[in-house]
Image (cartoon, rainbow, N blue to C red):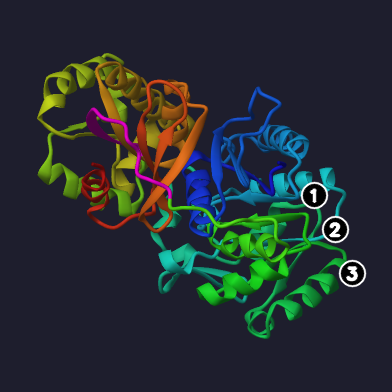
Amino acid sequence: MSVLLGCIADDSTGATDLANTLVKQGMRTVQLIGVPDSARPPDSDAVVVALKTRTCSPAEAVARSRAALSWLKRAGSRQFFFKYCSTFDSTAQGNIGPVAEALMADLGGGVTIACPAFPTNGRTVYNGYLFVGEVLLSESPMRHHPLTPMTDANLVRVLQAQSAGAVGLVPRPVVARGAEAVVTALAVQADGGHYCAVVDAIDDGDLLTIGEACRDLTLVTGGSGVATGLPENFRRRRLLREQAATPLPTARGAAAVLSGSCSAATLEQVRRMGEQTPAFMIDPLVLAARPDIVDAAIAWARPRLAGGPLLIYASAPPEQVARVQAELGRERAGALVERAIAAIARELVGAGVRRLVVAGGETAGAVLAALGVRGLRIGPEIDPGVPWTESIGEPPLALALKSGNFGGPDFFAKALRMLP
């Protein structure tokens, strides 16, 4: 059976977020890490290919995304989805616009949408402006993001700066009139020469309307929220059968939390976890001068594994991140932390850790690569947008991959309490 929905995600936690959404809507979903070597797709309704393209060069992001698209086309996908963060994490150069345009070109043109809205987690779009809770994106903590600082909340303007083609808008009053009104509006956008239109959404009902309106689009782009309405399109066509609930991961062994995210949400989660469990902090400036800090963290962790979960983190507040970047440079600082936590994860798994919670999209991608994980089965949701997963292959690992901005204050402890 061919894949119904073929998805490309720009990081690993975003891929898991999307896979979680599709599973909740009744699609058998497998997450693959990187473009698969095998020509044979897994037996599933949806496949999410997780890339690491959010912060690489636009040219590299386009090349990897096109390779993923080519594989998904060979897998027989009937529709395609390009997933990015609900806070539209990107720079003036990309990578959302260049990737979306390249995918559209490979699929024969037409029009697509851009909708990162995720109202359950406080991300809404109105008049093309992205809000995080009650404030504009540009006034939220995302303005201090160490790799993709978001200083403009106008998504039409942000996406247009990244795109060669024209970007339009389908405003909320149109969405409120229903799916057919959105279909008509998108046709008008296409006739006007727009390759993409930002679509407003302020609640879950809007997401369902938009999903229905996307039934005939070859490519949909957005956050995981807008994918909520896509499975129903396949169900109406009798292509999707109902599925049983997905069980929790069964992997047994020691537990650890690894955090490289510096988001405000993760900082609070790290603080709460640090009050309950042993914690080891990695300072990037110390790491740059003393690579043996990785060995020190592993030596610290080994004798503590039998006593319960532990925390190893490089998360830091914005002012500290700014100092580190000023001294080391943005890219070097991020790469140092990713490599360090990935190396620690590999050693911890070698020491018997089988349950890992990882915070931060870039960090999660580095950890998965270091562990050689090439696929994930999606389990039940921990908090909105974050499920437990289980790795495909040996040894089986229970993995919770959390986007930096997601999860409640006690997310780490809550996640570990769920496992049997």
Q: Nearer the viewer, residue 12 or 198?
A: 12
Query: Is residue 253 inside the magenta stretch?
Result: yes
Which circle's residue, 3 or 2, is located before the other in the chain? 2
373 sits left or right of 343 in the view: right
Q: Secondary structure at mark 3?
A: helix
Residue 36: image quadrant is top right
Position of residue 115 measured from the top left corner of the image (x, y, whole percent): 62, 63
Q: Amino acid type of disc 2?
A: Gly
Position of residue 384 measured from the top left corner of the image (x, y, whole percent): 40, 58
278 sits left or right of 217 in the view: left
**Which residue is label 2 attached to?**
110
Q: Amino acid type of disc 1?
A: Met
* Label disc, if present, on residue 191 of the rendered structure: 3
**Which residue is label 1 attached to?**
104
Q: Secondary structure at mark 1?
A: helix
Q: Which residue appears at 41% of the width and 20% of the height?
A: 394
Residues rendered magenta in the picture: 246-260
Q: Which residue appears at 58% of the width and 75% of the height?
A: 206
